[in-house]
Image (cartoon, helix red, strand yellow):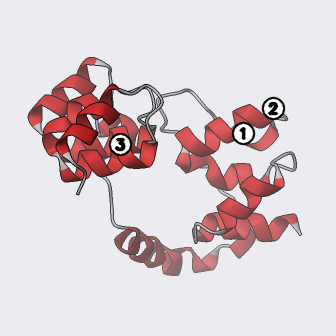
Amino acid sequence: MVDYDAAVAAVQDPNADPILLAKIAYENPEFGADVAVNPRCYPGLKRWIAEFGDDRARETLAQYGFTAEAFGGPVQDQKATAQAAQQPAAEQAQQPAAQAAFEEPVATNPYGFTAEQALTTTDQMQIAQIAQYAPELRACIARNPNTYPALIEWLGQLGDPAINAALASRQ
């Protein structure tokens, strides 16, 4: 457990370790609002706080325009998501596998990133931002020939069937 004094110091530190901030938010919900406004609080942590944080933390994030809905809805268990994804797969069996795997996703991110950008951009920083802030477009990033090798490796570790199919099409 994070010591109270260490937690106070960390949430006030603009260079705090993001992992420590996540641990503080999890173990000490009363610090959720302070963690949320720290410049090192990453979008995934803000999303988690927006859904699971106390009222003060959710209110603070809402003032900045961050709500669980703005980040794609409630956090879901990966196993439940994978099982739900497998059910429609039987319905899609009539379509060729390659066609079904590469249907363009609907961009739902609040940052304005599009599938077209994810597929065609050559800007490495923008590719990284899309991967971070628009998870629904990661399969498109995997198909982009300009995506850098370290990101390709990371995408392969996610275990997402659509991303894996996109990575397989690169070879």
Helix, strand or loop under label 1: helix
* Image quarter hosting the C terminus: bottom right
In space, the residues marked 2 and 1 are separated at their CA atoms by 6 Å
Image marks 2 and 1: residues in contact by CB distance under 8 Å: yes
- Quarter of the image where one finds residue 80: bottom left
User: Picture quarter containing residue 21?
Assistant: top left
Q: Nearer the viewer, residue 63 or 40?
A: 40
Callout 1 crowding tier (Cα within 10 Å): few <14, some 14–19, many ≥20? many
Determine if residue 24 is in view: yes
CA–CA distance in space, label 3 to label 2: 30 Å
Residue located at (34% from left, 35% from top): 10
Q: Which residue is mark 1?
A: 127
Q: Residue at x 56, y 27 (%)?
A: 112
Q: Which mark is residue 123?
A: 2
Which comes sooner in the sequence, label 1 or label 3?
Answer: 3
Answer with left or right where residue 86 lies relative to residue 154.
Answer: left
Say which mark, if any, is on residue 21. 3
Q: Is residue 121 toward the left or the right of residue 47 in the image?
A: right
Q: Are marks 3 and 2 in contact (CB under 8 Å)?
A: no
* Quadrant assignment, res 45: top left
Q: Nearer the viewer, mark 3 or mark 2?
A: 3
Left-right relation of 149 to 104: right
Per the model, the C-alpha gap separating discs 1 and 3 is: 26 Å
Residue flagged by tag 2: what amino acid is it? Asp
First in sequence: mark 3 vs mark 2:
3
Do residues under tags 1 and 3 come within 8 Å of each other at their CB atoms? no
Q: Judge by depth and name the residue closer to the eye, 109 or 101.
A: 109
Neighbor class of circle 3 (other Cα within 10 Å; few <14, some 14-19, many 20+) is: many
